[in-house]
Structures are given as C-alpha cells and as structure tokens.
C-alpha cells in the first residue's frame, strides 16, 4: 500500500506504536487504488481547537480513520487511563473510539464541503498494538484491532473488516469513484518536496508544494514502466526528475540519472546526494555498465537522436 509520506522520510516518530503500524501498512498488497495518509490534521473540530488523525486509509469507495493507541489502556468508572512506555499515566473521559468517531465526523464534514457530490462510506478502526481490549458495547468488533493484528496479513484483514462494516452501516450501496478527488483534496496538506535550490542550512526549511499535474506525473511514474514528460521552461521538469529518482531509490531500485549538460548533472548530483541514485552526464556514461532498474533522463530533447537513444536503451532494464 502506498503510504504518504513514506516511512523512509518520516524522520523521528515519537510513537513507536504508530511507526509499527506505518511499517505494516507499507507492506500491504491491496488492490489499487488505495493509499494510507499518515498524520492528517483537522483545523476544524466540533470541540477541539486542533485534532489529528493518525492514519487515513482511502479506497475508491471508502474512507477509514485509523486511531492508534500504544502502551497500556484501561477504563475505570467511565474514565480511560493511558499508560505510555515510560510508565506515565494520563486519565481522560474520551476514549480512543470516541476520538476516532469524532475525528471521522469532523473530516467528513470538511471533505463534503469541498466535494458535495462525493458518495463513499465512512468508518473508523482503533488499533492497540501492545494489548487486546475486551469486547464492549461501545464498539463493533470490526472497529477494533489489538496486538494479534500486528502482522501484514492480519492487519489487512482488520482493514477489510472495518471497511465492510462501514458499508454495512449505509442505508444503500455507495456510488464510489472518489479516490482521485479525495487525494486531490487531502494530499496538499502533507505532500511537499524540497526545492532544487534548498541546499545547505535551508534544506529543511525551503519547500515547494507540488502542483496537481506534477504530482499526477509522479504517481504515473510509479505505476508505469515508461513515462515521457513534456513541458516548457520553468514548468518543473527537473524537480520532477529528481523527485522521481529519489522515490525510486528509496524504494530499493537501482537508479541512474543522466542529461547532456555537465552543469545540470552537478545540480542534480547535489539534489540527490545521499539518496543512492547515481547521477552522470551523458558523455561519461559507459554503455557496458549493468542496466539500472530506473533510468531518468532530464532535458531529454538534447538526446533525441538515434545514437544517443541506442546508448540509453542499454542502460535501463528492459530497454
């Protein structure tokens, strides 16, 4: 399953329980289209100034809010007790199921304001990776997954059961077809990449939000073996080339990036330093080298001649 952002770029995560769930989500092999969004903030909530959804799983016909609670949970006299891994205990009136339910309704209202014709099922799932909670009338069994679900196959089943339950609460079958619209509405809240000029001390501070067409091309590059991107000067092709290479390398692929201009190659090398992607100007390429899993060619119009294309053909697996 596609996780946004990927665990490879999450950095430090305070909650080890959330990190375990994120790692499992990335390993799920579910029929597409489906994506899991990590840490979605809700600026508008019925009774909170700010709320956060741990994970949001989006199918074509379903939106599932996933609330993760690590550590030890207990309930006494109507109050929930949360004990973290350091032994610190907090007492709250609101339990994880109410948190998930209220966040689901808050997000549903917000999304429907932007997408009034959206017709999907909404549901939620509470995950406690460190323990099992006893059955309770407060929640349906399909809305809960304990530590026994902390494997790829069992978490996939828990998500499937929660999705099925969400549809069972509807008075009629939903129309679906909402994946693309949902991703377009929700993605800008979290999908950002560094600019090519964001080097040195400003690296983590200078970001650019991807335009919708740019992001669509990145997704297309992940799903198709060959992609040709055409655009005018300044439209962001080099940014997309670098980001495509970075994402492929972070996924474990061997990546080669090339271009005609040595100066442009230097710029790309600086942008991709430390990612595992190899950058080399075209005139220095060795056609006898082992082909890469992924070949990214920037300013490809400079190499649209038969001899250059024959060289490129030998440098990528599959030609």
Image: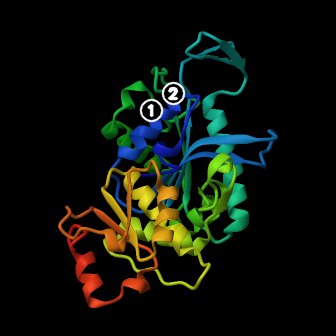
Residue lying at 67% horizontally and 46% vertically, measured from the top left: 201
Residue lying at 56% horizontally and 75% vertically, measured from the top left: 213
Disc 2 marks which residue? 16
Tell me, yes or no, if residue 174 can be seen here. Answer: no
Q: Residue 126: horizontal and vertical position, in percent?
A: 53, 34
Of 265 and 225, the residue lying toward us: 265
Residue lying at 65% horizontally and 63% vertically, measured from the top left: 209
- In the picture, the quarter occupied by the C terminus is bottom left
Q: Is residue 162 above or below residue 298?
A: above
Q: Is residue 297 above or below residue 79?
A: below
Q: 10 Å neighbourhood of mark 1: few (<14), some, or many (≥20)? A: some
Q: Residue 131: horizontal and vertical position, in percent?
A: 46, 20
Query: In the rendered view, does 162 fall on the left or right side of 192?
Result: left
Tell me, yes or no, if residue 21 can be seen here. Answer: yes
Check disc 2 and report its element: helix, strand or loop.
helix
Location of residue 298 (image quadrant): bottom left
């Amino acid at each position: 399953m596609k996780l946004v952002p990927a665990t490879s770029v999450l950095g430090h995560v305070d909650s080890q329980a959330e990190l375990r769930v994120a790692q499992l989500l990335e390993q799920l092999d579910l029929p597409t289209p489906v994506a899991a969004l990590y840490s979605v903030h809700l600026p508008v909530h019925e009774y909170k100034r700010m709320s956060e959804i741990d994970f949001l799983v989006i199918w074509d016909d379903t939106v599932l809010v996933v609330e993760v609670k690590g550590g030890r949970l207990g309930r006494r006299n109507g109050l929930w007790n949360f004990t973290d891994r350091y032994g610190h205990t907090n007492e709250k009136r609101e339990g994880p199921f109410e948190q998930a339910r209220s966040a689901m309704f808050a997000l549903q209202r917000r999304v429907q304001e932007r997408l009034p014709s959206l017709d999907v099922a909404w549901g939620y799932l509470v995950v406690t990776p460190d323990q099992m909670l006893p059955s309770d009338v407060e929640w349906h069994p399909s809305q809960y997954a304990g530590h026994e679900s902390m494997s790829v196959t069992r978490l996939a089943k828990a998500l499937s059961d929660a999705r099925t339950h969400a549809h069972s609460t509807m008075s009629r079958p939903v129309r679906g077809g909402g994946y693309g619209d949902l991703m377009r509405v929700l993605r800008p809240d979290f999908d950002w990449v560094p600019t090519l000029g964001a080097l040195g001390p400003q690296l983590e501070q200078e970001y650019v939000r991807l335009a919708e067409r740019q992001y669509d091309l990145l997704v297309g590059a992940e799903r198709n073996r060959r992609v040709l991107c055409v655009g005018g000067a300044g439209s962001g092709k080099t940014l997309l080339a670098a980001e495509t290479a970075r994402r492929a390398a972070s996924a474990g692929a061997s990546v080669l990036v090339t271009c005609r201009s040595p100066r442009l190659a230097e710029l790309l090398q600086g942008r991709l330093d430390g990612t595992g992607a190899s950058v080399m100007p075209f005139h220095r390429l060795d056609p006898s080298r082992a082909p890469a899993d992924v070949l990214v060619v920037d300013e490809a119009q400079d190499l649209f001649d038969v001899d250059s294309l024959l060289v490129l053909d030998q440098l990528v697996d599959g030609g």
